[in-house]
Structures are given as C-alpha cells and as structure tokens.
Amino acid sequence: MERKRAKSGEIRLTEVAKLAGVSPITASRFFRNPEALSPSKRERVASAAKELGYVPNLAARALASQRTEVIGVLIPSLTNNVFSDVLRGIYDASEGSRYSIQLANTRYSILQEEKLLRLFQAQKPAGLIVTGIDQTAESRAVMEAMNCPIAQIMEIGPDPVDMMVGFSHHDAEFAAVSHLVAQGFRRIGFVGAQMDPRMQRRFGGYRDAMKAASLFDPRLIVTTPVPTSITLGGTLLADLLSKAPDIDAVSCGNDDLALGVLFECQRRQLSVPEAMAIIGFNDLEFMASAVPPLTSVRTNRYEMGRSAVTMVTAAIEGNRPPEPVIDLGFQLMIRESSAPRRA
Amino acid sequence: MERKRAKSGEIRLTEVAKLAGVSPITASRFFRNPEALSPSKRERVASAAKELGYVPNLAARALASQRTEVIGVLIPSLTNNVFSDVLRGIYDASEGSRYSIQLANTRYSILQEEKLLRLFQAQKPAGLIVTGIDQTAESRAVMEAMNCPIAQIMEIGPDPVDMMVGFSHHDAEFAAVSHLVAQGFRRIGFVGAQMDPRMQRRFGGYRDAMKAASLFDPRLIVTTPVPTSITLGGTLLADLLSKAPDIDAVSCGNDDLALGVLFECQRRQLSVPEAMAIIGFNDLEFMASAVPPLTSVRTNRYEMGRSAVTMVTAAIEGNRPPEPVIDLGFQLMIRESSAPRRA
DNA sequence: CTCGCAAAAGGTAGCGCTACCATTTTCTGG
DNA sequence: CCAGAAAATGGTAGCGCTACCTTTTGCGAG
C-alpha cells in the first residue's frame, strides 16, 4: 500500500481531458480561451466538463499562473450610505467581468488600512481600489510594491498612486455655499461630523466660499469627530444655535446631518427655508422627498465604483485608460430648502 | 541553459527556513501552529520571516491543504440599510478570526443566488452565510454538496440547511399590528414594497393580526414589487388613501416606507399620530429622531451578522453550537407616532 | 547508563493547474 | 503540389506549500 494523501474526490481537469480525448493542456485552454481550440475539440471538452460537473480549482490556477482574478477594495465604512452606493457600482461592474471583489473595511483608520493592504499583498490581487488619497507613506510603499493597477476613488488630487476617479469635495462644497450666498443668506453655519479627510476638504470649501464673500466667522462652525448620524445633525444644530442664534442657513457636511437638522428645525418650529435654509451633501434619496425638499450636492457614487472597476480591469488587461485621473464632478440639486431669502 | 519558468521573485517559505536554519516544514508549522515549535526555533523562524519580509502564498497553501479560510456571504442587496448592518456584523466578527469574507450580491434573485453558489463552489469556502430560507432546490443541492458549515440568516424556519440565526418576521409584524390595535386604531393600512420573502412574511403577520381582531379588509393593503425607497412610501400612502380614505394608521413593511409615509402626511397636513398613526419595521436610526418619533420593530441585524460568523467559524473548527437555530427575537420600540387614539 | 516514550523536526511526494517550449496539423499562395 | 507560415495540440516541469509518515531529540524512570 503506497503512501498517499487522500484525494479530494473532486473532478480534475485531467479527467475532463481524458473523457474529451484531448490533452490536459488543451482542456485547460478551453476554460481560459475557448477560441484557441478547434470547434470540434471545443465541443468535446465542453460536453465532457458538463457531464462530469467539473469545477475548476481556483487555488491551483492561481498557483500555477502566478496571478489571481481578484480585485481588492478598501473602504472606510460599511454603514455609510455613500459607500454602499459606491460598492453597488463596484459589484455591478465586477459581475460583467471575470474578476471577483475582495472587500475590507478600514473603519476610517489609516493604520487599519495599512494592515489590510499588507493582508491583501498575500492574495496577490490583480487590481486594487482604495478610498481617498490620504494613505500613509508605508501604505503607499506597499501599494507600489504590489505591482498591480490601483484606483483611488472618492477624491481627486495631485500625485495619484496610479489611477483616480472622484471629484473635488472642496469645489463641491464651495459651490453649495456660494449658492446659499447667492440666494441672500449671510449667517451660514457649517455642521460637520466624522471629520475624515473628505469632510475636512468639504469644510475647506465652506471656509473659502465664506471668506470669498467676506462672511466667514468661526462662531458659525460646529464640528465633531463623532461618527455621523441623523440624530447627531439635531444635536449639532442645537450647539450651533446656542453659539450663533442669528444663523439663517446651515450647510451640512452630509445629508444625514441635513436630515437631522431639518428634524431639529421642525422640533423648534423653525420653518425651512424662511427661518432656516438647509443644504446637504451627496444627495441621498431622502433629500428630494423630505418636507420641504432639501437642496444637496449630487455626487456620482455609483458611477465612481463602476468606473474604478472598469479602469482597473482595463489596466490589468493592458488597456490603460488614456487619462489616469477622472473627475466625475458634481451637480447642485437646488430645492425648496434653499429658496431665496425674502428681503 | 535549462528550460524553466520565471520565478515570481517573491520570498518563499524555503528561503525563510534556510535563513532560520530549519527545514521548510518546520517553518510551515510556525505559521500555522507556532506552539508546536521549540521556543528557540520559533524565535529563529520569526526573525527570519521578518528579516526577509516573507508573505505566505495563500494559493499554494490552499492547494496543498485542500482548504481555504474564506467564508462566502450571499446577500440580496447592497443598498438596503438593513443589510449594511448585517454586513458590518459579519465583517466585524471576521476581523477577530483567521477567516476572510467573500461577498456576493444576489439582487433578490434566487436564480442569481444559484449561480453565485456555484461560483462559490470553485473557491471551496470554509463556510457559507446565505440570506433567507427560500433557496431553490438546486441551490440547496449545491449547498449540501459543498460540505462546509452553512448559516442561513435573517429568518428562522423549519428545515435548516445547517444552522440558522434570525427571527420571525411574521411574529414581529403581528406584534406591531397588534400594538396598533391595542392603541385603539381600527382602519390600519399596510404598505409593502419589494415583496421579497421576508416582506411577504411580514405581510402575513399583518394579515393574521388584523384577522385576529376582525379588522381585516383587503382594501387596506397596497403593495408593489418595485424596490423599496423613501419616495415610494409617499406614493404608496397616496394610493392607499385613494382606496381607503378612512384609514387611521399605516403599518409599513419597512422604515424607508414609514419615513416616506411621514413626509407624505406632512405634505397633506395630516398630523401624526392624531390623524394618522405610523409604524415601521427594523428601527433604523432615523426613526427615533423623526418628528414625531416613529414607532418601529427593532431587529438585531448587527448581532445577526456577528452570530452567523461566530457559529460558522466555530463549526469549521469542530465546535458546533449546541443549538443550530438561534432566534434573536425583536423589540417593539413604541414612540409618539403610535400614541393611543383619543376617543 | 540505558530504555521507553513523547515531543520536535525532517524527507518525500504530491495538491491541480498552467507556462514554456516542441511538435503536429492546417492553411496559404506561388 | 509543395514550401513556408500559422494555427492547433501536446509533453514536461514546476508554481509554493502542506499531509503524511519517519527519524531524531529530550528527558525522566528504572
């Protein structure tokens, strides 16, 4: 009795090849590039595989070919609606391709991100999608060592690791606040939570717009590192009103906060927009159906996820997009909550 | 010059072993079960690995050991907040373990689910988490053939494939509607969207509660297969009011619809709860901060994800939980929107 | 001082697939 | 009809790791 480890019991490529009457390598080609076979053999291998219920062993394939068909994705939150839209774009795009997605959650920590990047290294992903442009030097080093196409999403900025698809949070918020100014509002508050890099750049947009209109006043600002929520929007408005009771508008760092602000206004019988204008950021679905409908900045989150996958897969296959940085822009969705102030 | 394929250039286990002055198999053991080594060798291998920056090749490991450390997860939606909470639980629990998560989106299609299950087969996952209990016969066959621990989540029911963690949607909705009845409401409408199996079972709970109180009337019901949204809640309330203008309460199949219903009531100047009581399902965060705060049924979504991973990983390691079916129950969160009807 | 046993370490042989090259077959045009 | 090129197919040798078994080492008992 010879020493042997237990076979897995699964059908192997060799068995398919034998049944089809071809060599294993020909059968292998069938699964990777069917056009390379003559029609008759293609047919034979196909039916043999079907008959035996052959399922390729991905681990063996990855080992032999020295590559995988996995795209790693790092996002900072699974809870935030913003990222679920991005994820949907990513998963939708991946379904049309041969690649599968490996997702990990950094929880807004660049150190966690670094750790996860190193974990991904062991998987030798074919491509990588990371959120934002604020990786640690160590993370950047790991990414560069990974030697695969990488897309940074959600933002655009100088010095991409490889490719980028996003928009300028600064400019979007600048446009939002400028709109409020144009509508006649003067004491425009800002509420922000989480204060991750994107929120901070949005805050920068607010600050610059206010300064440009000579309306900037630090008392108009309330921020907190606490994770964002609708309830928090109410709390922050309460804080803001106690610091600056004379505000006539609030620019909210995101839509959750904006909805919380609206609810707080309702609780205080402050009519929107007569007593208080509100503007949000991202244009989540509820903004349009709130009463009154809330103005927001629409961002192309789904498209961002989709494009990232498309760019990365194209690059893997050698067709790098001509332009490595794509700005998807934004769109100001003007609704009743920022209707012009009556004199 | 001998024929040879290009080496990957990565550090291999053999090199670590050589530097540490041990055999490859000893180095291998170090990474899987460090306690099996004598302290001195353990030390030597650790420092050699560190010095060389060794990253294990997971594909080779999976091939040689005939198993992976991947848990496959199938969920029907990435957009729905309900699933993002479940996912958060899943990812949080997986981080404490050696297992990684492979996520796929069925888009509420049991055929897509079947296809994805077959895809997962090729990965030989160590465990599997699937949503709901309504898989096709074919899907069940694939699951049984996969020969790994499987947890069905979100619901409980008879005949688990393996393990289950969830709660009874029927009983939860039954409790919600019974609460409205007890508060004195009589013409209680139901609005439902998506109408996936869980929504249908909730509808069953509504129907049974209404029948038990002799209040059932098919004109009180509006449902649609359209995916759920906040905006849709408003539309469905409008439909419902046109069919049954005398309703005094609405039980909403989920919280998104409930918020849409609240907004529609605000638009129509119907005061809540005086003119219209509202109850939702899931207790998403905004329910408590809405004006008025909205009654809902709290479900333990995060815990569901967590438990599923815990049960599956325990089972992989041979410690099956004593009870294969866990009912996480629900909790009626009574708020102002269902305050008792004044006579 | 030796034996016996457990713990630690090592040797060998694959896991199932594909890269690389060699060979055979088919196609093309003169 | 044949040379030469192109397309199709096959043989061999790993990819980097671990299962399985054997051998060595350590250590206390007799």
Image: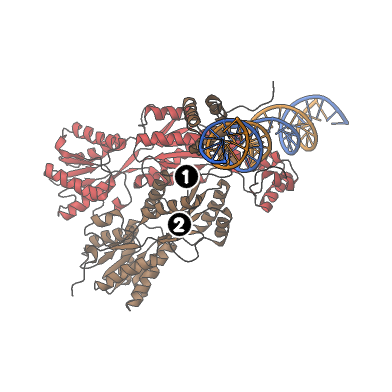
Chain colours: A red, B brown, C orange, D blue
List x then y, in percent, for residue A269. Answer: 14, 55
Residue positioned 35% across, 32% down in the render: A134
Q: Identify which amino acid the numbered label 1 is placed on.
A: Tyr
Badge 2: chain ID: B
* Total count of labels: 2
Q: Residues within 10 Å of mark 2 (few under 14, many from 20)?
A: some
Viewer-nearest residue: A186 or B56? B56
Determine the CA span between mark 2 and mark 1: 18 Å
Q: Label 1 lies in what chain?
A: B
Left or right relative to B130: residue A229: left
The mark closer to the camera, 2 or 1, is: 2
Q: Residue at label 1?
A: B99
Q: Residue at x 70, y 47 (%)?
A: A16
Are the residues under badges 2 and 1 in a single subunit? yes
Within the image, what quadrant is residue B207 found in?
bottom left
- Residue A139 rendering spot, x and y as whole percentages: 40, 30
| Residue B140 vs residue A279, the one in the foreground | B140
Q: Residue at label 2? A: B321
Answer whether residue A244 is visible to the viewer in this image. Answer: no
Find out whether the residues at labels 2 and 1 contact each other: C-beta distance under 8 Å.
no
Compared with A183, A159 (above or below) is above
